[in-house]
Image (cartoon, rainbow, N blue to C red):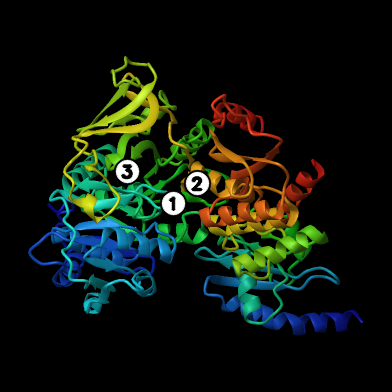
Amino acid sequence: MAGDIQRIADLESAPVAEAVAQHSEVVESLYVAGSVGARPLVVVRPMGFLTAAELRRHCRELGVAAEFDVLFIDETQAVDTAAPDAAWLTANAAPDALSLFEAPDGEIETQLVAVWERILDFTPISVHDDFVDVGGDSLSAMEIAVAIAQRWDVNLSLVDLVDASSVRNLSELVRAAQASR
Amino acid sequence: MDPLALPISDSVAVAGADGSQLTYRELVRRADNLGPYLPQERKGLVALLGDRDLATLIAYVAALRHGHAVAWFGSAGTASRRQDLVRRFRPDVVVAPARELAEALLGLPYRLLESEAAGVHAAGRTDGTAPPEVNDETSVLLLTSGTMSGGRAVRLSGAAVASNSRGVIDALAVRPTGCAVTSLPLYYSYGLSVLNSHLIAGASVLLTETPATSVRFWREFTTAECTSFAGVPFHLEWLAHSRLTWDRVPTLEAVTVSGARIGSAVAQAFHQRADAAGIRFHKMYGQTEATARISVLSHNDFVDHPDSVGRVIVGSSVLITDESGVAQQDGVLGRIVYRGPNAMQGYADDAVGLAAPDEMRGTVDTGDSGFLADGYLHVHGRTGRFIKPNGKRLELDLVERCFEQLAPAAVVGTGDERAHLFVEGKQSSAIKDLRFNIIMRAGIAPEELQIHFVDSIPRMKSGKVDYGSLAEMAADHF
């Protein structure tokens, strides 16, 4: 049984690993299948300005699964390619090096992800993705602020929005503003 | 005179976001290709409806090189506003990206010129009437207005443009190896002063329309090895709160901020972060009516004079006066009056106004209040009824008039660049819709136009709105 799951994971992982490796700013990459129920992890040695969100979008555009975590490593770090341990790698990652993909939880997050995806024309969006990393700027911030004001009657400044950084934090702001009424 | 007087050299004048480069020699050649399509043997008016694109820049250089005046009307956000400006100022030639050009000239007596060969979409006036007469000294016309209102044009002489640029080059130590970026619109006097000062200094400019609040902008900036960044206070707040790593760009040497008052805390934090990264941070003050820049605070002076906007640029001076025009002593608050070669010639509302002589004779009342202390200028506030959120200018009277059609309403601005609208009665869908309509048209955040419902708007005995009381009420909402 365990062998079957491993085989299925391998079948699904091959196209993702290939898509990741194809990205022009990926120097080296390794796909580590998650254990049952857990997300896969992609370990990447990048060049240029590559972000995790950009890598996921690239995979989504190529039509492969894009819901994976990303760990960036630099040239000094090595990964045990024979038996990579996703849990150990993520637990020991530098704070800025790890990007988790998490789908929205609850109504506000779900709607905010939909608003971001529509206005930023960027998909998929993790609730942890940073606003500027997924193509946000002051113009799109304005559109999002207006959408939030219209939907929840909550007034945010553009700086509030970029300061919140992620859908997760932004939904907290909306919730807090609603609670304080 | 041509205030730019570009050198014909092989160093790079304009860099594109795509990595393309244009030398001074090539820029001048392309500008001269356009020359034959502009009025010959008389001074004409060339209107630019575009902003930060190469064709518009070439037309700007061409018009100045051939002795014409440039009306840079890129701030007109809609086709009807562009039409209105063309109708009022009757330019000889209109230059714009193809679609805007067709829209703006619909039904007006203009026909397309064969200037495609020079890479520029342009149209010439064909009604056969006498061309507008333009003051001999005028080189540039810029609009003072905000994003929603009609706007007056400020008439700037070639000498003023040249002298202001020299002042900027001196205060910011612009070198031929420097590279600026068009982070601000070029139809905006501060943005144009960045372009002019760098071209006159023989430096280069990265021509891009990418918003400075995006990752893409900072990638373009890094790749083009830019050395300076010009922003408005909103940009600095955005940079401070976002995860953009502007302070890790290895070539960045200087950041300037102007365009509105910057909060003390924001400026302090920014200075500190810039200093730690070895980047100079300059607060500046200016006005379109004084050809962009009036004063610059050097990076090192910030420590001792953090609340000042610095020293007046070389060749200019500032006088603080009381309401009757009497000069005030050091430290005494009064009106800031600019004196010097950068003063505008006056305003123009239409083609007829372009012929007017120099009405200012070197003196401009800025409408701002402030004081001088040991040669350092401090700006206290403004007397005008507008706010400047995110670098946009929002006329409060205009907003007030919009809402008055629905219910008695009055608007006041607060020091944090927010408009507080007081409306008699209750919320309605019409008021809600109007608010969002204004927010979107003006390009501001919902937080910057707040509505408060009151039973009655406080008024003076005369019946006029008591803005003082409203300001206090608004301050309670800080």
Is label 3 in a helix, a strand or a loop? helix
Examine the rendered structure and indicate whether residue B317 appears above or below residue B26: above
Residue labelled with disc 1: B149
- To which quarter of the image does residue B101 belong? bottom left
Q: Sequence-wise, which precedes: disc 1 or disc 3?
A: 1
Residue labelled with disc 3: B288
- Residue A40: x and y in percent read 75, 70
Is label 1 in a helix, a strand or a loop? loop
Q: Which amino acid does label 3 sit on?
A: Thr
Question: For the point 30% across and 58% down, which residue is it?
Answer: B88
Q: What residue type is labelled 2?
A: Leu
Parent chain of label 1: B
Give the Cα separation between the discs numbered 1 and 3.
16 Å
Query: Foreground residue, A87 or B208?
Result: B208
Q: Sequence-wise, which precedes: disc 2 or disc 3?
A: 3
For label 3, the crowd category at 10 Å Cα-Cα, with few meaning under 14, some 14 to 19 and many 20 or more, is many
Answer yes or no: do the residues labelled 2 and 1 have beta carbons within 8 Å? Answer: yes
- To which quarter of the image does residue B280 belong? top left
Q: What number is the disc on residue B398?
A: 2
Examine the rendered structure and indicate whether residue A134 appears above or below residue B149: below
Q: Tally the marks.
A: 3
Examine the rendered structure and indicate whether residue B101 appears above or below residue B342: below
Quadrant that contains the C terminus of chain A: top right
Give the Cα separation between the discs numbered 2 and 1.
8 Å
Is disc 1 on the same chain as disc 2? Answer: yes
